[in-house]
Amino acid sequence: MKLGIIYAGQGSQVVGMGKSFYPREIFDQNEDLKELCFNGPLEKLSYTPYTQPCMVMVATIITDLLKEQGIVPDYTAGLSLGEYSALYCAGVFKRQQVIDLARFRGKVMQEAVSGIESEMIAVLGMKEELLQDLCHQASSLGIVSISNYNCPGQLVVAGEKKAVEKVKELALENKARRVISLNTSGPFHTSLLKEASLALKERFKKETFHEMKIPVIFNTLGHEIEDQSIPEILEKQVMSPVYFEKSIRYMINQGVDTIIEVGPGKVLSGFVRKIDRSIQLYQIEDMESLKKTVKALKGE
């Protein structure tokens, strides 16, 4: 078995997440996040500056519990925000450090898009080249681009509302199977996040990036790091597309045949199934699913 661990991104959060892992010291060290995770309300938990540190905090706990059971991946990756949890898994960040970074990232991302009328849509059943052309056609109305390459048949478009609405109209005219409006608080992974990118660049100058002990497959590359530095990649990540499908295909090409999704829900597992149905999938979001997964991986 060759194991990959992938971490869910923003949008997967649910009230009650992490509660079955309590008591853990990290919850009491971040009392405001603990309260939000356990009791919500969902509206506040879904506000970017809170969602991001809450998701990462729970992911670090699951990662640590897996390590305590001797389960360490051969490769790791995460969808957008999930990349920070993957870097924690790989030893690049310490636990409180990555929670604080996620808190900062959420804050500057929200500030960057404040006042911008924006939208994100999932476009199903359309070729990448055609959708890129439609974005180009709509760009006279504002900034718009493909922000996520999730899996075969699912792409996400983000940008200024009028331009995205035009892409939606053109996509339906061009026989897209379906167009779904996404409940997000900004046009993430577009050039509209430039201010957040610059803020992260300054923050990273004060941070220690520890040695990577497990290969991380990065969103903006779809493969392992080459000649870039991790801070450079993370600065770019907030305003660049997420190549999730490419990342999973890279993982599979390295021999990964088993993948654990960490985080609430099964969004990433759904993407992986559409990429390669032969992959053995597990998902961990609470103590019950953790025990079940550990048992299965140990053949008990």
Image: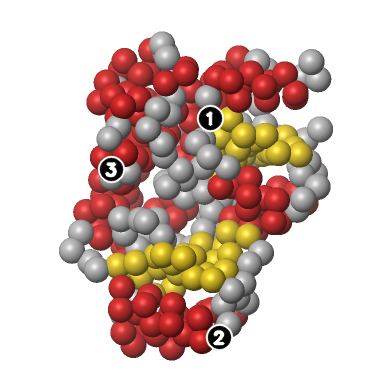
Alpha carbon distance from label 2 to label 3: 35 Å
89 is higher (above) or lower (below) than 119: above
Residue 27 placement: quadrant: top left
What residue is shown at x 76% (from left), y 39% (from top)? Answer: 280
Taking the image as shown, residue 35 lies to the left or right of residue 70, namely: left
Q: Are marks 2 and 3 in contact (CB under 8 Å)?
A: no
Q: Residue at x 59, y 55 (%)?
A: 244
Question: Residue under circle 2?
Answer: 174
* Residue where numbered disc 3 is placed: 43
Helix, strand or loop at mark 2: loop
Q: Tell which circle, 2 or 1, labels the residue nearer the N-terminal end.
A: 2
SS for dot 3: helix
Split into 4 quadrants, where in the image is the C terminus?
top right
Residue at image position (27%, 35%) is 41
- Do the numbered discs 2 and 1 sit on residues whose CB atoms are within 8 Å? no
Residue 54 location (% of width, % of height): 36, 33
Residue 285, which numbered label?
A: 1
Residue 279 appears at what percent x and percent y? 77, 44
Q: Is residue 289 above or below residue 55?
A: above
Q: Amino acid at mark 3?
A: Glu
